[in-house]
């Protein structure tokens, strides 16, 4: 039998692929499950069409049935693809840098990479020298309130900022904009919370630009994160050393000139 290549995909095939991408993009850190009615409303489809898409995606392993009746969640195939996507060079090289930094400053260290909706925690090196361990799970999606997001946005264009701040209040947007400006000027971002938790993040560059952030995560209210402090200096120099290992020294220079 001879295989027949009909050439370019038909318009309906292309539309179906686009629709699958649109459905998958509806899921995020605050939207972990959806009904067919939700999909229909958000994409402007009728419910029958939305339901057929969702059930077909379940068959393909892209979606799974949720715990609540009539809901759908991202499936095992998406998890598998996500894990493959995270196997970037920085993730293979970073563990020793995180371990050395964590031991030096006695704080949990975190590597985040840019995902579909912003920074995603890829690696965590917990500080086990303290009685209370502050940590975060790998795979956690970080939002605009995180130091990591603000560092990423400080190295990206206005379109990335607009997408990241879409739907938030004007006051919150102004706060994030100011924090992004400070991150660009200082080369790091610090977020402190009233309960004593803090995060400080610095950018990591490869030859293409920012590829990750390294962050400190702790709960010590006495932690010295002032400009030039040993803890902050160690964070910045570790991020710079990892950038040099990845061939990203020029990226640091370009951001410093902004």
Image (cartoon, rainbow, N blue to C red):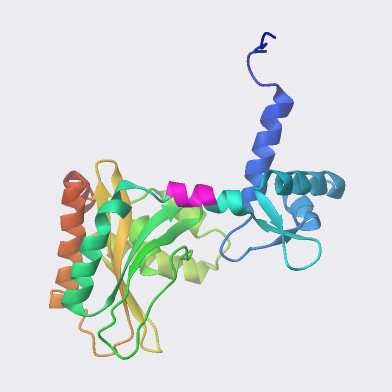
Is 52 placed above or below 181 here? above
Residue 12 image offset from top left, x and y in percent: 74, 27
Would residue 220 appear left or right of 143 to someone viewing this image? Answer: left
Report whether residue 186 is seen. Answer: no
Tell me residue 21's x, y (percent).
Answer: 62, 43
Residue drawn at point x = 31 percent, y = 60 percent:
213
Whether the magenta-drawn stretch holds residue 83 is answered as yes
Q: Please tell me whether residue 13 is drawn above or below residue 122 in the rendered image.
A: above
Location of residue 107 by image quarter: bottom left
Q: State the image quarter where residue 237 is shown.
A: bottom left
Relative to 52, is 80 on the left or the right?
left
Question: What residue sits 18% from the left and 63% below the top?
Answer: 238
In which quadrant of the rendered image does the N terminus lie? top right
Q: Name the side, left or right, on which 43 lies relative to 201.
A: right
In magenta stretch: residue 50: no
| Residue 234 % position (x, y) | 15, 70
Say left or right for 173 vs 182: right
Q: Is residue 129 above or below residue 174?
A: below
Magenta range: 80-85
Q: Nearer the viewer, residue 257 or 147?
A: 147
Frontmost residue, 16 versus 84: 84
Q: Is residue 42 visible?
A: yes
Residue situated furthest front in the rendering: 1
Along the line of sight, which residue is nearer the eye, 115 or 54? Answer: 54
Residue at the far right in the pictured view? 48
Outermost residue to the top: 2
Residue 57 drawn at (x, y percent): 71, 45
Please, what is the dominant secondary structure of the magenta stretch? helix
Q: Residue at x 50, y 51 (%)?
A: 82
Above or below residue 53? Residue 227 is below
């Amino acid at each position: 039998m001879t295989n027949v290549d009909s050439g370019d995909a038909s318009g309906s095939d292309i539309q179906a692929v686009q629709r699958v991408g649109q459905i998958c993009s509806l899921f995020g850190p605050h939207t972990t499950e959806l009904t067919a009615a939700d999909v229909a409303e958000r994409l402007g489809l009728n419910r029958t069409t939305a339901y057929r898409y969702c059930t077909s995606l379940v068959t393909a392993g892209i979606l799974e049935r949720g715990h609540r009746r009539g809901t759908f969640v991202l499936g095992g195939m998406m998890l598998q693809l996500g894990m493959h996507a995270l196997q970037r060079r920085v993730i293979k090289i970073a563990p020793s840098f995180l371990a050395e930094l964590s031991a030096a400053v006695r704080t949990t260290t975190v590597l985040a990479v840019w995902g579909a909706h912003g920074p995603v925690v890829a690696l965590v090196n917990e500080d086990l020298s303290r009685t209370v361990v502050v940590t975060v799970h790998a795979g956690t999606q970080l939002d605009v309130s995180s130091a990591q997001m603000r560092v990423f946005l400080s190295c990206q264009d206005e379109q990335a900022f607009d997408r990241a701040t879409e739907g938030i209040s004007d006051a919150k947007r102004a706060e994030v904009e100011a924090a992004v400006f400070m991150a660009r000027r200082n080369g790091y971002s610090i977020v402190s919370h009233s309960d004593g938790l803090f995060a400080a993040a610095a950018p990591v560059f490869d030859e293409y630009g920012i590829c990750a952030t390294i962050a400190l995560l702790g709960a010590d209210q006495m932690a010295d994160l002032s400009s030039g402090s040993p803890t902050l200096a160690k964070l910045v120099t570790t991020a710079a050393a990892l950038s040099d290992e990845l061939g990203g020294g020029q990226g640091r220079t370009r951001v410093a000139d902004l």
